[in-house]
Image (cartoon, rainbow, N blue to C red):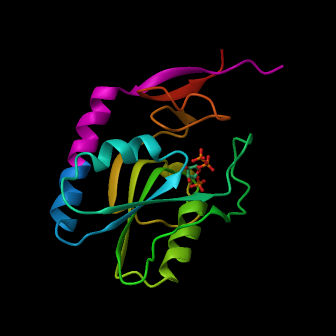
Amino acid sequence: MRSQPKPGILFTRDEIEVTVKSLAAEIKRDYQGRHPLLIGVLKGSFVFMADLIRLLDFPLEVEFIRLSSYGRAMESSGKIKVVQGLRAKVIGRDVLVIEDIVDTGLAISFLLDYLRKKKPASLKLCALTDKPSRRQVPVTIDYLGFTVPNKFIVGYGIDWDEKFRYLPDICTLEDE
Ligand code: PRP
């Protein structure tokens, strides 16, 4: 039987704090006065979103969307669908999608296409982490926190098999 992997710190909570502050400053510079709609992709983005919006002291709206999950698999099935939709109208809005990780890019490119069809005034992506070594489809990340190696990442909202979301640091998993 496969043993439970052990998390090792990749980015500390202090490094995350500095990075989230810097992302918030960029977003504030670009979106202040535009009443943007921030759409968090569940579940992985919830911790990042919570920290980020508390640094954005101007009027904005928060929404969440949930896509089909990897479930217990370490690999994406490649078949993405919306399993929990939006309540807010997207048409004419300045939309900023908040992701925890862009890996193959399949989930976010599906979501950006889905949102583009709803005719937002603008559509951009903020991702906490990017794993470019795994990309299968091109993705433009407008606001990026960290580039991560080709290892499984957990913590700060990101899970492995629904575990480790609670870790305050961003960690990689190593087999024991
Ligand atoms: C993760 C992550 C992204 C997606 C990235 O979600 O939050 O949405 O996978 O992978 P991709 O670039 O290869 O498509 P997951 O399905 O694990 O759900 P969760 O956020 O609920 O953990």
Can you say whether 175 is above or below 116 in the image? above
Q: How many labels does the image show?
A: 0
In the image: residue 27, left or right of residue 164 = left
Q: Quadrant of the C terminus?
A: top right
Residue in view at x 23 percent, y 59 percent: 27
Residue 67's spot in the image, x, y percent? 62, 59
Residue in view at x 22 percent, y 43 percent: 21
Name the residue nearer the viewer: 107 or 39: 39
The residue most toward the top is: 176
The residue most toward the right is: 1
Q: Quadrant of the N terminus?
A: top right
In the image: residue 133, left or right of residue 2 = left
The residue most toward the front is: 87
Name the residue nearer the viewer: 11 or 45: 45
Residue 10's spot in the image, x, y percent? 42, 28
Q: Which image quadrant for residue 124?
A: bottom left
Residue 138's spot in the image, x, y percent? 51, 67
Residue in view at x 56 percent, y 28 percent: 164
Can you say whether 96 is above or below 43 in the image? below
In reply to whether residue 30 is colored magenta, the answer given is no
Residue in view at x 19 percent, y 59 percent: 58
Q: Which image quadrant for residue 72?
A: top right
Can you say whether 32 is above or below 93 in the image? above
In the image: residue 18, left or right of residue 96 = left
Q: Which range is magenta? A: 1-22
Residue 95's spot in the image, x, y percent? 37, 70
